[in-house]
Amino acid sequence: MAIRWPQARTTRTVQLGRSMAFRIEAAAALERSTFSRAVAPHGRSRPISKHPNAETGDSLGYSIAISQDGNTIAGGAADEDCLMPGIFPGATHVCQEDQPQDNSSGAVYIFVRNGTTWTQQAFIKSSNPGKEDWFGSRLTLSGDGNTLAVGAQVENGGSKGINGDQKNQSAEDAGAVYFFTRTGTEWKQAAYVKASNAESYDEFGSAMALSRDGKVMALGARGESSSAKGVNGNQNDNSAQGAGAVYVFAYQ
């Protein structure tokens, strides 16, 4: 379901779906400064371990989300460079040395707390990492920390809808969102999500919100250009550059 502003305009300054991104960016800016230390009682703090493949310019903390109980943290590293797809448990994964550098494919790190001890639970890459995808530039967790949505707002996939062809790279900066679930301590990718009208420069996944139970997801596409108004309007229209749109998905 695509949601439109009743008075979509042709100027790029409107950008429906960007307001969520502003809030997330503001929160991430604050949390980047505190991510490496956990607040303890009486204002004291204690360090949280960094990931084992930390490199200059990875930008861990570019985005961040915390479960309701405070025991699970997801940290996005939008400029991380490894091009190996998949989910790697624990903190043992180190990218092969022959992987291209400075490509900003992006990654997400999951940290969990047991008592007063933090450990890395998983290192997560998209199922189709590509150069400058910025996977991890946006992310959100459900209340229990078992559902994770990760945005790659400049991913180039040209497919539409759920679990389309990930090898189709025909839509520059169209954007994508990846949906992950956790059972026990094991993470798996549940869906590769594209807009129903995915097109170049839409930046689908530039903002996102997930319901507390992880069943409903709202995703912003700040560059989407339809002038349609309201809910489920004409998605094929492109007469309002940068008007923006919001898409709502339900997980079953």
Image (tube, rainbow, N blue to C red):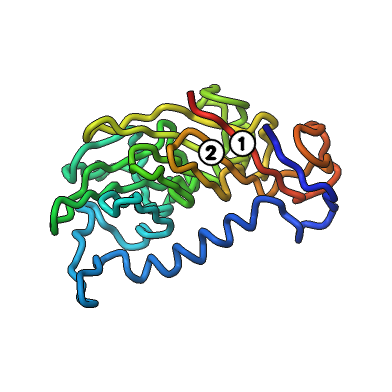
What is the x, y in percent for residue 238?
82, 40
Tell me the residue at 53%/31% (across/down): 193
Is residue 47 placed above or below 107 in the rendered structure? below
What is the crowding at mark 2: few (fewer than 14 residues within 10 Å), some, or many (at least 20)? some
Is residue 14 placed above or below 34 in the rendered structure? above
Quadrant assignment for the N terminus: top right
- The answer to the question of whether label 2 and label 1 lie on touching residues, with beta carbons closer than 8 A, is yes
Picture disc at residue 164:
none
Tell me the residue at 21%/77% (across/down): 42
Tell me where residue 47 sits by quadrant.
Answer: bottom left
Tell me the residue at 49%/42% (across/down): 211
Q: Secondary structure at mark 1?
A: strand
In the picture of the structure, the residue carrying the numbered disc 1 is 248
Tell me the residue at 31%/33% (across/down): 182
* In the displayed structure image, the side of residue 23 where residue 111 appears, left or right: left
Please state which of residues 156 and 72 is positioned toward the viewer in this rendering.
72
Label 1 is placed on what type of residue?
Answer: Val
Mark 2 vs mark 1, CA separation in Å: 6 Å
In the picture of the structure, the residue carrying the numbered disc 2 is 217
Is tag 2's residue or tag 1's residue first in the polypeptide sequence?
A: 2
